[in-house]
Image (cartoon, grey):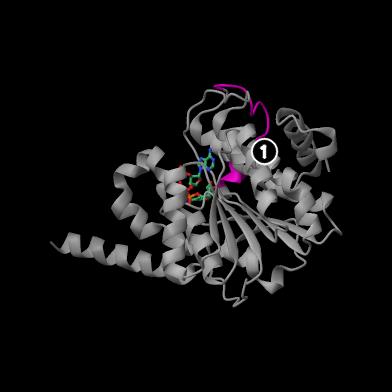
Amino acid sequence: MWLLLWVAATLILIRMLNKLSNGRCYADTVMSGKVVIVTGANSGIGYATALELARRGAKVIAACRDDERGKAAVSSIIKRTGNQSVKYIHLDLSSFDSIRKFVKEFKSSEAKLDVLINNAGAGGLGRKKTADGIVRDMQVNHFGPFLLTLLLVPILRKSAPSRVVIVSSILHKFGTIARINEENAYGYFQTYCNSKLCNVLFSNELARRLEGTGVVVNSLHPGQVNTSLYKATALEKLRSLVLYTFFKSPEEGAQTSIYLAVSDECDLVSGRYFADCEEGNMSAKARDEGLAKRLWSMSEQLVKLRPEEAI
Ligand SMILES: NC(=O)c1ccc[n+]([C@@H]2O[C@H](COP(=O)([O-])OP(=O)(O)OC[C@H]3O[C@@H](n4cnc5c(N)ncnc54)[C@H](OP(=O)(O)O)[C@@H]3O)[C@@H](O)[C@H]2O)c1
């Protein structure tokens, strides 16, 4: 009995300490008139990010891979915020065709883009390659967002000042870019770490290439967040207790994305890595400019970027 009470008290204490140490976005920026794309807006951190941006008045494009889940998220955000300018456009990052269709549809209805939030991500989707010839998790987490972003760079430039926010992870610290498109070269966990290193390298290199254009680019770690990302892992079994006690809620996990999207403090900040709404430490590998350039040219080739789309 005493042991149970002690365990419960310890868990409550850990939960409270976690809550106190979470970074929050205190900026009260109104986003009326701004157009924002949030990928993976139907669940977890993406849904919480889209909800808050809609609450602040932004026109939010929820870019999701499943029509039913995407439309349900949009209805729920409209209902909760009263903002009617929330729209669903289909986007499957595991298909380059789908990415190109998304950009075409977006450009046919919107004249500008103020913020692109590359939030969607996955792990454990299988080691087989996609129809585009890319390891699936690598395509969803890096090569797809790479193509999406490059196709949107012209409209981001035109809309400057504008922002790109890339949701990475602290796990980028364990990543490598060697053999990242070899089927079965790595297990799910290592593939995830590799894709998250690519996120930070891509963010840094894009920031360098867009310097002076008014488009700022930053990456972030959202914290350990209780979302469906863990469904694919053994952690699912301990989900309710462990995740609830030790992990952030999706709303808490969305704070750094929201901060980078709205805060005036970030107007001129580019090529940095954030956690808990503060600049964090990226790994030495993530800071390596040579590695970022190698990843960039590998990505251009693998996504079959056309010469006129290169930046
Ligand atoms: N949760 C954490 O502790 C944590 C920690 C560090 C970093 N992150 C990062 O945070 C981001 C958001 O993840 P989350 O934790 O919020 O997980 P989540 O709830 O599983 O959300 C992931 C989102 O990505 C979407 N997605 C998956 N495959 C896609 C595809 N092929 N095309 C388009 N969208 C796709 C999912 O759509 P469906 O619902 O249709 O699958 C979902 O909307 C990810 O980039 C993740 O790597 C999370």
Q: Does residue 151 lie above or below 186 as drawn?
A: below
Q: Residue at x 51, y 65 (%)?
A: 84
Of all residues shown, which one is farthest toward the right?
212
Q: Residue 227: x percent and y percent?
A: 42, 51
Closer to the camera in the image, 200 or 96: 96
Q: Residue at x 37, y 64 (%)?
A: 14
Closer to the camera in the image, 5 or 16: 16
Q: Indicate whether residue 179 is drawn in magenta.
A: yes
Quadrant that contains the C terminus:
top right
Q: Secondary structure at mark 1?
A: helix
Residue 225 makes an appearance in the image: no
Kind of residue at badge 1: Arg
- Magenta stretch? 171-184
In screen coordinates, is 5 left or right of 266?
Answer: left
Q: Residue 211: x percent and y percent?
A: 84, 56
Q: Which residue is mark 1?
A: 100
In screen coordinates, is 80 left or right of 270?
Answer: left
Q: Residue 304: x percent and y percent?
A: 74, 29
Quadrant that contains the N terminus:
bottom left
Of all residues shown, which one is farthest toward the left?
1
Prevalent SS, magenta region: loop
Of all residues shown, which one is farthest toward the bottom?
28
Residue count near mark 1 (Cα–Cα under 10 Å), binned few <14, some 14–19, many ≥20: some
Q: Residue 297: x percent and y percent?
A: 79, 33
